[in-house]
Image (cartoon, rainbow, N blue to C red):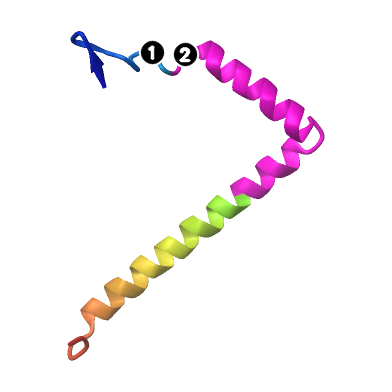
């Protein structure tokens, strides 16, 4: 959105916004649960990446086989 030629959301995310967000997250989840949550998120991302790579490799091997497809 523009207002008088200036972008309205130009400074929408500033460093102090991130500090407030971090404080809220710590208050909601508690400092004891955050390491476990981060570990679970990292594990989920690793699984997602490996599955994505496997799907790409499977698609590439299907394309390399003659006589497949419609």
Instruction: For the N terminus, give its image quadrant.
Output: top left
Neighbor class of circle 1 (other Cα within 10 Å; few <14, some 14-19, many 20+) is few
Circle 2/circle 1 CB separation < 8 Å: yes
The image quadrant that residue 70 belongs to is: bottom left
Nearer-the-camera pick, 29 or 3: 3
Furthest toward the front, the residue is 3
Residue 32 got which mark?
none
Neighbor class of circle 2 (other Cα within 10 Å; few <14, some 14-19, many 20+) is few
Which residue is the site of mark 1?
Answer: 11
Residue 57 among magenta residues: no
Is residue 10 toward the left or the right of residue 44 in the image?
Answer: left
67 vs 57: above or below: below
**Which segment did they paint magenta?**
13-42
Residue 14 got which mark?
2
Nearer-the-camera pick, 20 or 49: 20
- Label 2 to label 1: alpha-carbon separation: 6 Å
Residue depicted at x 75% and y 26%: 27
Q: Position of residue 31 (x, y in %)?
A: 79, 30
Q: Position of residue 59 (x, y in %)?
A: 30, 73
Is residue 63 toward the left or the right of residue 35 in the image?
Answer: left
Furthest toward the right, the residue is 32
Nearer-the-camera pick, 53 or 37: 37
Residue depicted at x 20% and y 86%: 69
Q: Position of residue 57 (x, y in %)?
A: 35, 69
Nearer-the-camera pick, 26 or 47: 26
Dominant SS of magenta comes to: helix
């Amino acid at each position: 959105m523009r207002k008088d030629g200036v972008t309205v959301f130009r400074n929408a995310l500033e460093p102090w916004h991130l500090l407030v967000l971090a404080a809220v997250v710590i208050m909601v989840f508690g400092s004891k649960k955050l390491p476990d949550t981060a570990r679970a998120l990292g594990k989920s991302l690793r699984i997602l990446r490996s599955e994505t790579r496997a799907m790409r490799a499977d698609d590439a091997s299907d394309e390399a086989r003659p006589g497949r497809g419609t």
